[in-house]
Image (cartoon, coloured by chain):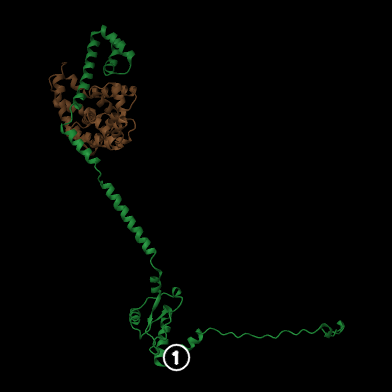
Amino acid sequence: MSCEKYAGWMTDAALGEPCAGRESELLAHAMECDACRESLGRARQLRGFVDRGVEALVAGEPSPQFTRHLRRRIAQESRPQRSAGTVWVSAIASALALAVVLAIMFARRPVHNESNSNIASAVNPISAPPGAVTASVAGRRNAERTAPTGDSRRAAQTGAASPTHPVIIVPRGQLAAAAQLSAAINSGRVDGNQLLAAQQEYARPLQVHPIEIAPLEIPALADVTETPAELIPF
Amino acid sequence: MDALAASFPRSAVSPEESLAREFEQRLADCPKLAYRVALGVLHNTAEAEDVAQEAMLRAYRNFHRLRDRDRFRGWLVRMAFRLALDRIRAKGRRERREHDVTRLLEQGQREASVEDLIASREFERQVARALDALPEKLRIVMVLAAIEGYNTREVAKLAGLPEGTVKSRLFLARKKLAESLQCLVKNTPAG
């Protein structure tokens, strides 16, 4: 009966079960029982078998080149070099910086470029008095947007280049009206000089003559004749 | 004044150089420890060397982060163990090995004695298979206990575990290994 009890402990004790009380009891029994002593011997042999097997697995040393190779790799690590990660980070940072610079450049683009596109083109105008109609139109920024035509661009370019063909800059919505006016002047239906004179007339400052106002003459109280209240007609 | 002058070169050493020197002192014995831990997992000398190299390099890179330098060996051991496991998983070698060992088990049973069996290649593979089948937390204590016969306290320090935990895990690991290898012992006459 007692041998059966110890049989279960044999392997555990041999494998180093952390229970000191059991081990001493088992050893005392094994001293008296040959069968249990032999079983304990076998269990210890199994433990040795296991330990030596694992020890054999991890036995050995790295090759002689191991340390040399390791030192070389460490030396490479110590050298200041740009890793692939660093290269990627710097590339992304450069791209971002470029994008920011471009965004700022577009945001600060001069307004006159835009307003130039708002302004219509030029009309090759009045042949009559050269240089007579050269007024640029005010309020260009509020002008309506219409697409400039190629002809008007060309006209603007040629007009700018030639002093005999002055350029009239008009808001886009008034281009047709300006063209009609130009055609009317060229055909003689409208007198250009008269228009110019009218423009100069409007441009002349207003002359306001002072108004002379005679002082009020207030009659003296004594001169006022009293009228009885009952005589005032309603 | 002379003492001050003599101390000047020492104080002029940069922190990086100081760390490098400190690491250099550990290059004497630590690679061997890392190699053996990796070998216990991989059972292949070339791969174990690779893993040990990688573990040492990582240790070098992160050496400045380790505040308690006395824990360097345990830190390295755990790193090597983890790297070796990662490599095993990456290659899926375990399945192939299990297939091989099933075939070799029959050959191992025909060995003549315990000593012959232990020295045989087949037995080594059988032990490797049993060791690979252990859970990781049991495997690392078993491998460390097998390296240069570390005692429980040393294993506890390396594994970063309480001593009692190491004792119980060692016992469980040995028990599982014994169950796996028992068939070989039964068929082998006592040496």
Q: Residue furthest bottom?
A: A188
Q: Residue furthest front?
A: B1
What is the quadrant of residue B188 in the picture?
Answer: top left
Identify the residue shown where x is 27% and y is 49%.
Answer: A87
Residue B45, position in %: x, y? Answer: 17, 32
The relative height of residue A199 versus residue B159 in the rendered view (above or below) is below
Mark 1 belongs to chain:
A
Q: Residues within 10 Å of mark 1 (few under 14, many from 20)?
A: few
The relative height of residue A104 versus residue B19 in the rendered view (above or below) is below
Residue A34, position in %: x, y? Answer: 23, 8
Task: Assign the N terminus of chain A to one quadrant of the image.
Answer: top left
Residue A1 visible in the displayed image: no
Residue B159 visible in the displayed image: yes
Left or right: residue A33 versus residue A120 is left
* Three-letter code, disc 1: Asn
Residue A194, position in %: x, y? Answer: 46, 91
A197 vs B67, nearest the viewer: A197
What is the quadrant of residue A29 in the picture?
Answer: top left
B40 vs A127, nearest the viewer: A127
Residue marked by disc 1: A193
B179 vs A209, nearest the viewer: A209
Residue A72, position in %: x, y? Answer: 19, 38
Task: Assign the C terminus of chain A to one quadrant of the image.
Answer: bottom right
Classify mark 1: helix, strand or loop. Answer: helix
A233 vs A78, nearest the viewer: A78
Left or right: residue B126 versus residue A149 is left
Q: Colour of chain B?
A: brown
Identify the residue shown where x is 14% and y is 19%.
Answer: B113
What is the quadrant of residue A41 in the picture?
Answer: top left
Q: Which chain is in green here?
A: A
Identify the residue shown where x is 18% and y is 36%.
Answer: A69
